[in-house]
Image (tube, rainbow, N blue to C red):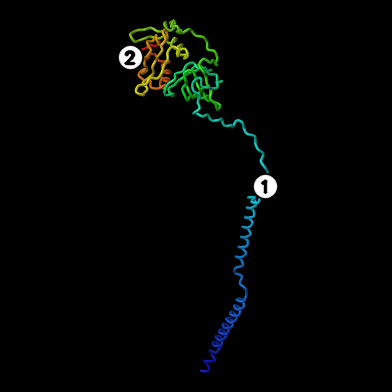
Amino acid sequence: MESLVKRYFWVVNLALLAILALLAAKALNNHLAGRIAGLPTGIAAPEEVKASAADRRRAEEWAQSIINRNLFNSDPPEPEEALPEDPIAEVEPEIDPNKIPGPPPDPCDKSEAGISLIATMEADPADWSMAAVETGDGDRIVRIGQTIEEKQVMAIYRTRLVLAGSGKFECVEIGEKKTRKRPSRRPTASRGGKADSSIKDGVTKTGKNTYQIDRAMLNEQLEDLGKLSRQARVIPHYRDGKPQGFKIVGVRPGSLYSHIGVRSGDVLKSVNGEEVTSPTKALELYEQLKNSDNVTLEVERRGRLTNLEYDIK
C-alpha cells in the first residue's frame, strides 16, 4: 500500500499545483478587474468627439447661409442702371368698340390710308353690309371685320367706311380719291339712260329668258365695281325675319343689268342651283362665275320664280 502511494504521489502533487495555479490566476484577474473598474470609462468619448465635429459643420453652414442671404444688409448690392424703354415694345392703345363713329354728320378723323370708297351696301343686320373699295392693289369688296391696308373694317354706312388702326378710328367717305388714277375705260350707261354700245353689242338675247354674253365685255364690266354699283342697288331681302336672297332695285336703263334681263324688284335666290343666303356666299359665287361658261340665275319676280340662263363665250 505504501508503495502504491509513493508510486502516485507525483500525480497528486501535480494536481495540487494546477489547482493552486488556477486559484492564483483567478485572484489576480479579480484584482485587475477591480482596478480597471475604478478608472473613468472612455466608451462615450468617440461619440462626443463626433457630435462636436457635426455641430461645428452645422454652425459653419448656418453662418455661410446668413452671409449668402445678407439678412443684415451687410453687403448691399450695387444699384442696377435703368435701361431705356424700347419704343418698339410699346403697347398699342385699345379701341372702345362702343364708341365707333356713326354715319355723317357724326365726327370722324379722315383716314390717311390709300383707300377710296366706291360704293356700299348697308344692311340690317350690319354683318351683311358690304363695301366696294379701291386700293393700290385694285378693287375689292370688304365686310365688317375684314382688314384693308392693315386696318380693320369696323362699320359700313351708306356713304362712309369706318376703319380702326393705330389705336384710333378713322373714316373714308365716298368721293374721296386717294389712290392712283385708274386707266380710262369705254363709257358705260350714263345717268341719263343712254345705252352703252359696248354692253349692247356684247349681249344677245337668244330666247325668252336666255342670253349669250361676250366674255371680254363681261370681264371689263366686272373689273370696275364702282361703275357696276352705280347701275343698280343690291340689298338683302328678308321674309319672316329670315334672309331670302338679295333684292335688286334702281336698275338703270342701258345698264348691264337691264341688258341681261334683270328688272328692278327682282330677288336673286340662287346661282347655278346654289342659294345666295349671305354676303359670303355671294362673294364666293362671284369669284366662281368669273370663269364659268354657263350661268343660271333663279330670281323671284312678282311672287313667281323665274330662271335666267346665260351662255358666256
Vertical comparison of 12 with 238: above or below: below
Vertical comparison of 3 with 191: above or below: below
Residue 272's label in the rendered image is none
Nearer-N-terminus badge (1/2): 1
Secondary structure under tag 1 reads: loop
Vertical comparison of 277 with 191: above or below: below
The residue depicted at 57 percent of the width and 32 percent of the height is 91
The residue depicted at 61 percent of the width and 70 percent of the height is 42
- Tell me if mark 2 has few (under 14), some (14-19) or many (20+) residues whose alpha carbon lies within 10 angstroms of its own: few
Q: Which residue is mark 2?
A: 302
**Quadrant location of the C terminus in the rendered image:** top left
- Tell me if mark 1 has few (under 14), some (14-19) or many (20+) residues whose alpha carbon lies within 10 angstroms of its own: few
Q: Position of residue 47 (x, y in %)?
A: 60, 65
Nearer to me, 15 or 96: 96
Q: Position of residue 235 (x, y in %)?
A: 41, 18
The residue depicted at 67 percent of the width and 47 percent of the height is 76
Residue depth check, mark 1 versus mark 2: number of the one nearer the observer: 2
Nearer to me, 256 or 49: 256
Nearer to me, 80 or 313: 80
User: How far apart are the two marked residues, 1 and 2, measured between alpha carbons?
Assistant: 90 Å
Q: Position of residue 38 (x, y in %)?
A: 61, 76
Q: Which residue is mark 1?
A: 76
